[in-house]
Amino acid sequence: MDFYLLWVAFLLGIIEGVTEFLPVSSTGHLIIGAELLGFTDPSSKVFEIFIQLGAIFAVVVEYRKKILDTFIGVQTDKVAQDFTKNLIIAFIPAALLGFFFHSLIKLYLFNPIVVGIALVVGGIVMIIIEKKLTSRPKINVDKISNKQALIVGIAQCFSLIPGISRAASTIMGGLIAGLDRKTATEFSFFLAIPIIFAASIFDLSSNIDILSKSDIPIFIMGFVTAFLSSYFIIKIFIWFVAHNTFIAFGWYRIIVGCLTIYYFL
């Protein structure tokens, strides 16, 4: 057993878990981390799928009651039906773009320089949105309109560029649509389930031949650490957004993006 690879899996699992639901781009951090740690062989593509699934499992566990209630009531309960409809509306735009342009995006955009630029641009946009943000009524995710869900879904399309961040694009899209920070963040969490699950299945089917029994311990390590760190971060992040703005994340993105461009250019 390669203990260095287990250590790498542990570190990347934590990176994925900590950054997946923060507006800082988990994909971007994984690309940078993998480059610095020298974990760029073909199996790394499959490894990323497993740690993303670990992070998503944390959302499922944290919001299991809401998910179960929606699943049970989707045929008879209007609240469950409206919530499901909004998730579908928000899911479709990025899913379609990802399906048709997935290979091109992976080929041309998955490199540290693109990530660095996207981090900086995304950070600037985040700060501008926050500076222009006005107060808005607090609602829960069940009260989101179809139009607001569509705006979030369109915003999510930008997250196909590594470094932009799925969380950042959907949360900022929610703010632009008139949602409060907590509601926009929670809807982003729920939307992550279908979009990341679909992307993981698509990636796994494309890389199934790379799977090897010797990689199982590494995948398990990454999955578990991503799950545990995500579960921890979700609770803290929800509390944070209820009391703070996203400006600090914007400056973090700008600093990390500039350092990334400087290092890899």
Image (cartoon, helix red, strand yellow):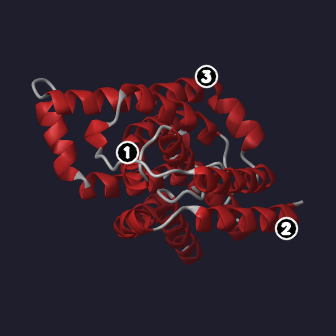
Q: Is residue 199 left or right of residue 88?
A: right
Residue 187, label in figure = 1
Residue 166: x and y, percent?
54, 46
Camera-side residue of 28 and 43: 28
* Residue 213 seen in the figure: no
Residue that carries the numbered disc 3 in the rendered image: 100
What amino acid is found at the position of numbered circle 2 in the picture? Tyr
What amino acid is found at the position of numbered circle 3 in the picture? Phe
Is 70 rendered above or below residue 256? above
User: Dot 1, crowdedness within 10 Å: few (<14), some or many (≥20)?
Assistant: many
Q: How many marks?
A: 3
What amino acid is found at the position of numbered circle 1 in the picture? Phe
Residue that carries the numbered disc 2 in the rendered image: 263
Is 56 rendered above or below residue 225? above
Going 38% across and 37% down the picture, which residue do you hit?
194
State which mark lies toward you, 1 or 3.
1
Camera-side residue of 8 and 161: 161
Give the SS element for disc 3: helix
Give the SS element for disc 2: helix
Is 12 rendered above or below residue 94? below
Residue 61: x and y, percent?
25, 56
State which mark lies toward you, 2 or 1.
1
Is 197 rendered above or below residue 25? above
Determine contact: label 1, label 3, CB under 8 Å.
no
Residue found farthest to the front = 135
Residue 44: x and y, percent?
60, 54
Camera-side residue of 62 and 176: 176
Mark 2 vs mark 3, CA separation in Å: 32 Å
Going 50% across and 39% down the picture, which residue do you hit?
208
Residue found farthest to the right = 265
